[in-house]
Structures are given as structure tokens and as C-alpha cells.
């Protein structure tokens, strides 16, 4: 049985597409937003919704805006690198469309898999520079994703979550619960009591 935290650790081997996925790796030379062809009739559009213009005009064209290497690189245990603030991370997204219909949006996070209508997309890697954000040109940016027809269930899954009422009945010494979780449970209990739906 695999240790539950294994899925959060950096793999020892290089990232590879899961079985059954078709790889799409292409340079980003047309600027953003940029269209990436996936399945027949289905494509992705890579966007960076920052709402800023002068920041990219003044930046060095080869400056790295976002890269998957920052997420997949191993971090030393004694002195880990601080993670960038949420507001400092570029909100890169791959919007999956079929014609003009939007099927879903996939945030670029290393190893993320997401079903978008008839296809499932996995993010394998990317490298984005400021020049690509600013416009067309070869500034060393690239995108690497995989896709497959979403005609079967996922091949990995975790244990189902414990029902809140079952968790509440466990002895206090065998459970850990946040204040937010407790408050949410109490609120739900009061609503059920008011509506005469008290769970015994």
C-alpha cells in the first residue's frame, strides 16, 4: 500500500505523460493568447489574465515569468526556499474549447490532470518568458501537455472522505478538527434542527 503523502512528493524520475495520453509539445512563438491543438475539433488557448501592460513592455524579453521547473525542482530539507506569494505567481491557464464553446479551464500546475468535456488534459511542463507575453517572437517559451479522450474513469484514487456525522461520533482523542470545520458542522446542525431534520 502506497504511503498517502507520496502523491505530493517530487518524483525521482523525470515527468512523463501517463499511459494513454498523447503528448503535445510546442514552442510559443505567437505571443499570448496562443492556440494549442489537442483532439479533433478540440483545442486549448493559453492565456495570462494579469490586466497589466506596462509591466511587460518594460521587462527584459528573456525574463522568466513562469516555469514548471520551479514546482518540480527538489527543495532542500534544512533550509527550504520560500514559496512565492500567491499574488506574485502568474495565473497561467489553458482554456479548453470545442469550436467557440468553452469546455473547461486548466490552471498550469505541474502534473495536474483535469477532465474538460470529452477530453482529459494533463500539464507536463512549461516555460514562459516576458517577451512571449508581450507579443510574437521566439523568446524560448514552450508548453508541454498531454491529452486523451475522457471515455473512462480515473486510474488512481484516494480513500473516500469520512462523513461529518460519523467523524463527530468518534472519541475526541482520535480526531483532529479545525475551528472552521467545527463551526461549519455546528451551523449545519442548527439549520437541520430548525427544519426538523435532526440526525440522531
Image (cartoon, helix red, strand yellow):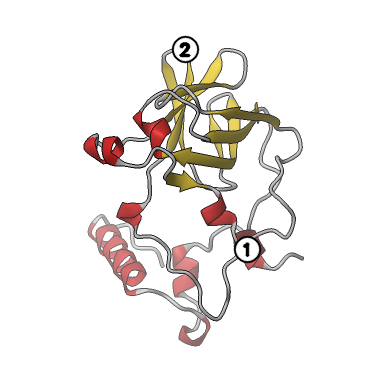
Q: Quadrant of residue 32?
A: top left
Residue 64: image x %, image y %?
44, 46
Label 1: state its secondary structure: loop
| Residue of label 1 | 9
Q: CA distance from mark 2 to mark 1?
A: 37 Å
Q: Residue at x 53, y 63 (%)?
A: 162
Is 184 positioned to the left or the right of 42 in the image? left
Is 127 positioned to the left or the right of 56 in the image? right
Q: Residue at x 32, y 42 (%)?
A: 59
Compare residues 143 and 7 and report the one nearer the observer: 143
Quadrant in the picture for the C terminus: bottom left
Residue 58: image x %, image y %?
27, 39
Is 137 positioned to the left or the right of 10 in the image? left
Q: Quadrant of residue 2?
A: bottom right
Compare residues 63 and 119 and report the one nearer the observer: 63
| Residue of label 2 | 99
Q: Are marks 2 and 1 in contact (CB under 8 Å)?
A: no
Label 2: state its secondary structure: loop
Q: Quadrant of residue 47?
A: top left
Amino acid at each position: 500500500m502506497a504511503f498517502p503523502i507520496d502523491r505530493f512528493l517530487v518524483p525521482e524520475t523525470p515527468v512523463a505523460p501517463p499511459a494513454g495520453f498523447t503528448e503535445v509539445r510546442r514552442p510559443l512563438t505567437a505571443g499570448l493568447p496562443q492556440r494549442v491543438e489537442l483532439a479533433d475539433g478540440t483545442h486549448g488557448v493559453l492565456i495570462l489574465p494579469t490586466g497589466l501592460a506596462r509591466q511587460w513592455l518594460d521587462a527584459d524579453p528573456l525574463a522568466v515569468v513562469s516555469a514548471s521547473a520551479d514546482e518540480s525542482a527538489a527543495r532542500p530539507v534544512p533550509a527550504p526556499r520560500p514559496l512565492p506569494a500567491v499574488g506574485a505567481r502568474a495565473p497561467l491557464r489553458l482554456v479548453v474549447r470545442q469550436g467557440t464553446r468553452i469546455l473547461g479551464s486548466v490552471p498550469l500546475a505541474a502534473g495536474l490532470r483535469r477532465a474538460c468535456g470529452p477530453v482529459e488534459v494533463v500539464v507536463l511542463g512549461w516555460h514562459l518568458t516576458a517577451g512571449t507575453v508581450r507579443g510574437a517572437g521566439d523568446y524560448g517559451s514552450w508548453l508541454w501537455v498531454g491529452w486523451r479522450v475522457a471515455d473512462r474513469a480515473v486510474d488512481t484514487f484516494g480513500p473516500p472522505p469520512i462523513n461529518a456525522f460519523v467523524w463527530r461520533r468518534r472519541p475526541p482523542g482520535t480526531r483532529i478538527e479545525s475551528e472552521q470545520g467545527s463551526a461549519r458542522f455546528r451551523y449545519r446542525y442548527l439549520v437541520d434542527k430548525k427544519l426538523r431534520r435532526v440526525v440522531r
